[in-house]
Image (tube, helix red, strand yellow):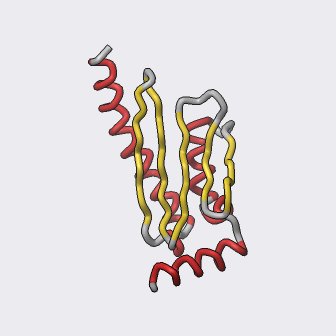
């Protein structure tokens, strides 16, 4: 029953603002970091969006469901894909400061994993 209640709250919340408006700080932050601001935010539907640049080796996807935001960042290096995923269970009440902090943490964690991924791929070349 709680899940259905959360879905109803999602629907009510997203009637007033779409996923981009709700998580603009994150999406614009990823666009700036990954694509120097030249990527495009694509709102796919009321609960899904991504930040992407044509011809790029990376994409950042956003899924908002039952008050939880899932961010999936995919990066290809020499045709080997690394997938970074992070869940935010209480995203319904996210603040701008909280989103900026989350962005910083995700970029730091991603970069740590990317260094390992690149080393692994290069050792197999």
* Camera-side residue of 26 and 42: 42
Report the residue at 66% width, 72% height from top: 14
Q: Is residue 94 above or below residue 110?
A: below
Q: Quadrant of the N terminus?
A: bottom left
Coordinates of residue 40 in the picture (x, y in percent):
69, 42
Coordinates of residue 39 in the picture (x, y in percent):
66, 39
Q: Is residue 36 above or below residue 14?
A: above
Coordinates of residue 33 in the picture (x, y in percent):
55, 40
Q: As drawn, is 10 to the left or to the right of 68?
A: right
Q: Is residue 91 above or below residue 101?
A: below
Report the residue at 50% width, 69% height from top: 91
Q: Quadrant of residue 46?
A: bottom right
Q: How many marks?
A: 0
Q: As drawn, is 107 to the left or to the right of 41?
A: left
Which residue is outermost to the right? 16
Coordinates of residue 66 in the picture (x, y in percent):
51, 72
Report the residue at 55% width, 49% height from top: 61
Q: Quadrant of the C terminus?
A: top left
Q: As drawn, is 125 to the left or to the right of 50?
A: left
């Amino acid at each position: 029953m709680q899940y259905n209640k959360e879905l109803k709250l999602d629907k009510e919340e997203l009637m007033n603002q779409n996923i981009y408006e709700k998580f603009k700080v994150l999406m614009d932050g990823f666009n700036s970091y990954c694509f120097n601001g030249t990527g495009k935010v694509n709102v796919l539907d009321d609960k899904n969006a991504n930040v992407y640049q044509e011809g790029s080796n990376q994409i950042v996807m956003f899924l908002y469901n039952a008050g939880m935001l899932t961010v999936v960042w995919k990066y290809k290096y020499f045709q080997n894909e690394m997938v970074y995923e992070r869940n935010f269970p209480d995203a319904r009440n996210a603040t701008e400061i909280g989103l900026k902090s989350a962005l910083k943490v995700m970029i730091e964690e991603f970069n740590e994993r990317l260094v390992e991924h690149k080393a692994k791929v290069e050792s197999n070349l």
